[in-house]
Amino acid sequence: MTLNALEITEITEFGKPLAGQVAIVTGGSRGIGAAIAKELARNGAIVAINFVSGFEKAESVVKEIEAQGGTSFAFQSDVSKSEDVQNFIQAVKDRFGKIDILVNNAGITRDRTFRKLSTEDWNEVIDVNLNSVYHTTSAVIDHMLEQKYGRIINISSIIGQAGGFGQTNYSTSKAGMLGFTKSLALETARSGITVNAICPGFIETEMVGAMPENVLESIVSKVPMKRLGTTKEVAEAVLFLAQAEYITGQAINVNGGLYM
Ligand code: NAD
């Protein structure tokens, strides 16, 4: 029996671990988020990403996924604004009918030592990194509870565990994500939903590339593996958690041994 192209495609998709699942990756237009979006798509998921500005970058991620036979779409939505997030989630539901995986990845830094930190620096980081997690999760949770299935994966940081000089705002936002992860995991564990976090160490991205070279060299020298992590290494941890059945309320460190 010879299979036609459509049947082969169906079998190929069927063989992928996330075939038939719909994922949302916030801040999926670049850096770690783009790597996560591509990794989930490569493994069969339909992937929706959002962007605030920089439509071209978001579009290029969508095109790359589509070129590999996947399905993706990008939507303009500021994760710090509840209404924007609700519109984004509704657009995903309207288009694909469901949401299985939510990756809260969007994040910013506004680093200053505490005495120089303005109220705006504080609020902006808490709004984008932490309040966003409330907005996205509250927009998907009823749906996940109804379908008795969900994977919520929060991209926290080593800075939320160990602290960071000049990063009280960022560290607070990332530590807050860890408390949120554990508490929501407790509340949803009986409903087929897992809630986990990933704490990347220092990963090769624009965020880390913006650090002064001497600071970066000093960080790398302290990493037991003596190198930065890659966005793909973080994406692979997300893929693992997206498939894990019996893991909830955990934080997985992807940090080359820098914090144990
Ligand atoms: P990045 O700056 O390259 O990407 C951040 C993404 O978030 C971008 O796509 C940006 O458009 C999006 N974003 C920012 N503000 C937004 C908003 N208001 N609404 C919607 N989207 C918004 O950063 P990255 O290095 O890829 O980091 C991704 C995540 O990983 C962040 O949460 C960051 O805190 C975390 N993290 C990064 C590192 C690292 O070493 N790069 C380490 C630990 C944790």
Image (cartoon, helix red, strand yellow):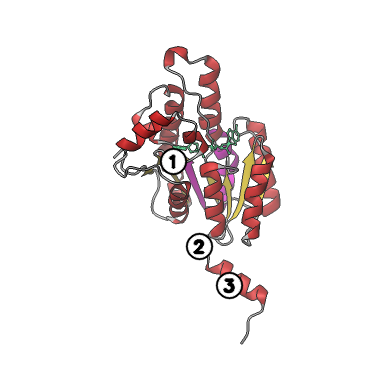
Q: Quadrant of residue 7?
A: bottom right
Mark nearest the camera among 3 and 1 is 1
Circle 3 residue: 11
Percent x, y of residue 223: 32, 39
Look at the numbered disc 1 and give the secondary structure of its residue: loop
Is the CB atom of the residue marked by disc 1 within 8 angstroms of ligand 1's nearest atom?
Answer: yes
Percent x, y of residue 77: 66, 36
Residue 116 within the segment the image draws in magenta: no
Q: Disc 3 residue type?
A: Ile
Query: Residue 211 bears which disc, if any?
Result: none
**Does 172 appear above or below 71?**
above
Look at the numbered disc 3 and give the secondary structure of its residue: helix
Could you tell me which residue is drawn at 54 percent across and 44 percent down?
33
Could you tell me which residue is drawn at 39 percent across and 54 percent down?
246
Circle 1 residue: 203
Percent x, y of residue 260: 29, 40
Residue 146 within the segment the image draws in magenta: yes
Label 1: how many residues lie within 10 Å, few (<14), some (14-19) or many (20+)?
many
Query: Are the residues at dot 2 and dot 3 in contact (C-beta closer than 8 Å)?
Result: no
Mark nearest the camera among 2 and 1 is 1
Could you tell me which residue is drawn at 31 percent across and 36 percent down?
221
Could you tell me which residue is drawn at 53 percent across and 68 percent down?
15
Q: Disc 2 residue type?
A: Pro
Dot 2 or dot 1, earlier in sequence: 2
Percent x, y of residue 94: 70, 49
Label 3: how many residues lie within 10 Å, few (<14), some (14-19) or many (20+)?
few
Look at the numbered disc 2 and give the secondary structure of its residue: loop
Give the CA distance from mark 3 to mark 1: 35 Å
Circle 2 residue: 17
Dot 3 or dot 1, earlier in sequence: 3
Magenta residue span: 134-154
